[in-house]
Image (cartoon, helix red, strand yellow):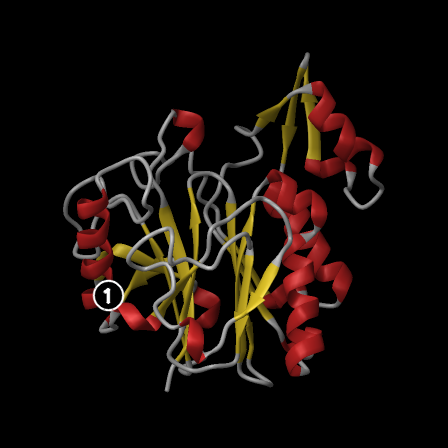
Amino acid sequence: MEVFNNLNGLLKFSILDKFPKVLDFVTTRQNPFGYGNNFNIGYSGGDDKETFENRMLLATALVLKPENFVIQTQIHKDNYKIVTEENAGNGFLSKVSAIQGTDILLTNIKHLCLITRSADCTPVLLYSPDVEAVAAVHSGREGTFLGVAAKAAKLLKENFGADFSKMIACIGPSIGKECYEVGYDCAGKFFKNPRFSDNTISQKGEKYFLDLKTMIFDDLTALGLKPGNIEKSAFCTKCDDKKFFSARRGESQRFCAGIMLKK
């Protein structure tokens, strides 16, 4: 990952540099211009007025307007919404106006910025250059178990004709494999599912750990995406808590990842 357009508080995926038709970004604790330490982008864990001001600052930095953003209420499942012009601005001003009960947003409409929020869960951005379509995915533990990122890729193919071999995937900052400790019952569910390889579930004494990013990577390559077309962020949100919000650190604020087709 690299700094977005000299804005020190925003990051972007290096793999998308060669695609001028798409905009992508990941926010951090700092505002886009590199100041402060509480750039909360979610209407949780803080003052709504402050969140609105933060979102407006993000829009300004990206040279966008509120109506360019589309935000969902995430529920740790694999529900989806195909975003159209009618959804312009959904979720920007309030939770009530967000697209309800989804973890996948996808569109082929230009100038609609799809947003997924996080504070340890894995944000995944997908881009299909062959058909000019994008998706933003929220993949926490339950979503990863359900294969939500792979489902989003399938939806891009089913609805827009995307070719898996040409699809670009960006697996964003989230809690890392050394930090994501889970209970025996949770680990057992993954152990019993042959979809998940042994190297994505580890045990240290009586503690169990999950590697969500590699699970997502494996799901996508099994579907037909090329490993070279997938960028996996090295950031662990719990370890890098000076850069990102982390629920495991007791924080309820959110950073976000976004993707948009440019006009």
> Does 5 sit left or right of 142 as displayed?
left
Instruction: Please state which amino acid type lies under the numbered disc 1.
Output: Ala
In the image, residue 213 sits, relative to residue 33, either above or below, namely: above
**Residue labelled with disc 1:** 59
Q: Position of residue 141 (x, y in %)?
A: 61, 39
Q: Identify the residue shown where x is 24% and y is 45%.
A: 39
In this view, the residue in front, 78 or 121, is 78
In the image, residue 67 sits, relative to residue 98, either above or below, namely: below
Q: Quarter-wise, where is residue 135 in the image?
A: bottom right
In this view, the residue in front, 150 or 75, is 75
Q: Identify the residue shown where x is 37% and y is 87%.
A: 263
Q: Position of residue 60 (x, y in %)?
A: 18, 67
Q: Identify the residue shown where x is 72% and y is 27%.
A: 187
Residue 165 seen in the current view: no
In this view, the residue in front, 183 or 35, is 183
In this view, the residue in front, 80 or 117, is 80
